[in-house]
Image (cartoon, helix red, strand yellow):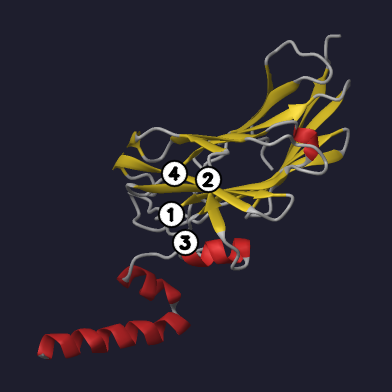
Amino acid sequence: MKRRSFLQAVGLAAAASAVVTPSIAFAAEKPKGSNEMGIDAALKALTGGKKITPSSKVHLKAPEIAENGAVVPVSVEVDSPMTPDDYIKGIHVFATKNSNPRTVDIMLTPANGKATFSTRIKLGSTQEVLIVAETSKGEFLSASQSIKVTIGGCG
Amino acid sequence: MAGRKSLIKIKPKKYKTGEVVNVSFMIMHPMETGMRKDKKSGKLIPADYITEVKFFFDDKPFTTLKVWESVSTNPVFTVSYKVPGKGKLKVTYKTNTGEVGEKIKKVKPKG
């Protein structure tokens, strides 16, 4: 018990000093990003509690095994006529286990002609990449794929 | 802003009015997450990443990207665009350190 109470005391001291000198707290614990949040919170912030339905309209192309987590190519295509009445308003890319799961939010317009997007993202560990597409009617469609990462890419 | 290298690419190279092309925006940027440590000094490298990329055609925005730290170093963003005719394609970006920049490419459809 002695060791535990000692650790608790040290923890409390670190927490107290965090207010005054954040640099000490940083040395003691893992650094936290300013945008850190869970995937559930990120999804809730996006949809406002609405249901997300997995859909075959969303095509996600990504490697199953990524040797280097720092560069993982991801491309998305969503089937949509892209007319002013019916188009994809947004595509949101989430890396579910990164400390900040939000990766890119793409806001599209009918002028795009096709709802596609591709980029390269960083993955900290083996995880699922989740794509949420928002239609102009307010529906949320999703697709996901798990990617095995041999070497993490977040420092 | 110390002249960051950036590039806009349109694929395929030859396109017609009304065709849907892929527009890529590439930029040389470290995309520091703020969680990585300097190996020599052991200090954290401050976060420096792109937060917003906007695509314009003749000053009309058609796609906006909100970007976070988890995008790779020297990112490439590719979107589709239906070429409405001759014009000017412009891409602007913003970073969390307040840096802004833009790149312009002329759109010349054949036929």
- Quadrant containing the C terminus of chain B is top right
Q: Please give the label number shown on residue B31.
A: 2
B87 sits to left or right of A147: right
Which callout, 1 or 4, points at the residue further toward the start of the chain? 1
- Quadrant containing the N terminus of chain B is top right
Q: Are marks 3 and 2 on the same chain?
A: no
Q: Residue at x 33, y 45 (%)?
A: A152
| 3 and 2 marks in contact (CB < 8 Å) | no
- Report, in whole angstroms, how far the alpha carbon at label 1 lies from the one at label 4: 12 Å
Q: Label 4: chain? A: A
User: Callout 3 environment at 10 Å: few (<14), some (14 to 19), or many (20+)?
Assistant: some
User: Callout 1 environment at 10 Å: few (<14), some (14 to 19), or many (20+)?
Assistant: many
Quarter of the image holding residue B93?
top right
Q: Please, what is the three-letter code of the amino acid marked with disc 3?
A: Ile
- Report, in whole angstroms, how far the alpha carbon at label 4 lies from the one at label 3: 16 Å
Where does label 1 land, which residue? A96
Q: Is residue B83 visible?
A: yes
- Report, in whole angstroms, how far the alpha carbon at label 2 lies from the one at label 4: 10 Å
Where does label 3 land, which residue? A39
Quarter of the image holding residue B26?
top right
| 2 and 4 marks in contact (CB < 8 Å) | yes
User: Callout 4 environment at 10 Å: few (<14), some (14 to 19), or many (20+)?
Assistant: many
Image coordinates of residue B106 in percent, x first then y, are: 82, 22
Where does label 4 land, which residue? A122
Q: Is residue B65 visible?
A: no
Q: Label 1: chain? A: A
Under circle 1, the secondary element is loop
Q: Residue at x 39, y 55 (%)?
A: A97
